[in-house]
Image: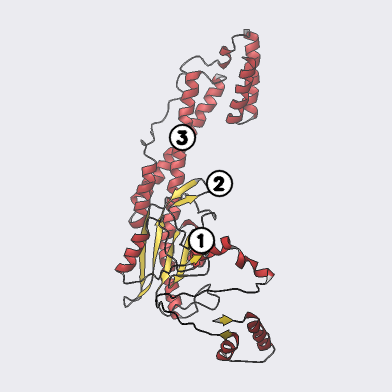
Amino acid sequence: MRCDAEMMRQLIDENSRGKKRTASEVLRAINKFESKKTKDINAHFFKVELIGINKENEDLLDTKKIREYLSFVAPAPYQNTFHYREKVKKHAKEIAYHIDEYSITLDGEPIFKKYTTILKKADNSKIDEVFDVVFKDFRDENGNLIAWMWVGLTQFKQAIPKINQMRGLRLRKENIQIGGEDALQKLFKEDRGNSYFVGEVFAVAKDLIPNSQRDYFNENPTRAYFEKLLRRFFNEELHKIYYDGSAVNSAYKKIDAYKVKEAEFVEKDKKGSFVSKEYRTIEYEKVQVAKKQAENAQIIIVKTKEKADGIFAKVIERIEKEHPQEPVSTTPSAGPPKPARPVRRTDKLSAYNRDERKLISKIFDIIISATDSKTAEMIISKIEDGLS
């Protein structure tokens, strides 16, 4: 088959000027067919050649962009590094749904759906991972399957960065993607909701018909019912998962921050690193503030766990595995503990007399009052190195 794009544009222009043609007339005018005999009846294939590409459409010649596009839009199989592909296929089989998959190659290399289990930041470092997939079937009042979906479970630490091509719940009909990664975003109560998830929604109902732009479905009662079912699941189940998951992760960060701050205080105390008693008291008070935040965070975790069920219970269980720790003590502190040794950081500058060490100590106090603890420690350490 040969399709004459120039002729098609000409006919479109003529149509805009009032010269009307039927769809059959247009197709007959722009398409030409020919066939060749082959002895190998299994040698079924077709080849597409794009001739005379306009300059504004030269992206069609960018192999990398074409591969990335096909890896999610085309009905390709999952790549073998996606560990849950068999689980997805098993569920499809259980509900009597066949996932259409075709062998597609570009420059001789096969195309696969680029799903993986690792989620990364822009700097390519790992931030989270898909540890399981769960399923949801959407049926009408008579039990007929309207659509079904799989969604990847993570710890929901944050919205998935754009560098992860697979992010978002993608809409598919007959395993061909409809629209982009944000086709279903409007069904979430928050715009950010869709960016917390990885997964696919397979539209099944025959009346869910892609529009001419293939960016969504034609408007009809089936589409309205489809949206109603998805909107309910997204906003009653998925919203709770990423919202509460984010809250629990934030709570554990506060507990971890307290543990670090407490350990740093104890270490400095052992080494006699505090410049003065006053500075030691200030740092101890910071530890107590962090402790109070950790106690409140612990309450949030307990309350969230109490109401966790279904899918979210799995998420909570996974988060807890990454944060094995003893509960934060809620016993009120009577005050700063006695220092392990005299708090005279300048004592180690033994090459200087008492008055000189007092002057150095005052300089250290000024540095501490003028900047944050981390910067002050760095400057003081540099001074100590220079004076030693």
Q: Quadrant of the C terminus?
A: top right
Q: Quadrant of residue 224?
A: bottom left
Disc 2 vs disc 1: Cβ atoms closer than 8 Å?
no
Residue 75 percent location from the top left of the image: 45, 69
Residue 307 seen from this side: no
Give above or below for 61 relative to 208. Answer: above
Quick check: 311 left or right of 110? left
The tag on residue 111 is none
Residues at marks 3 and 1, CA–CA distance in whole angstroms: 32 Å
Residues at marks 2 and 1, CA–CA distance in whole angstroms: 27 Å
Residue 29 percent location from the top left of the image: 60, 88
Judge the density around disc 2: few (<14), some (14-19), many (≥20) Cα neighbours within 10 Å: few
Q: Which residue is mark 2?
A: 123
Residue 63 percent location from the top left of the image: 57, 62
Q: Residue at x 38, y 31 (%)?
A: 331
- Name which of mark 3 and mark 1 comes first in the sequence: 1
- The image's colouring method is secondary structure
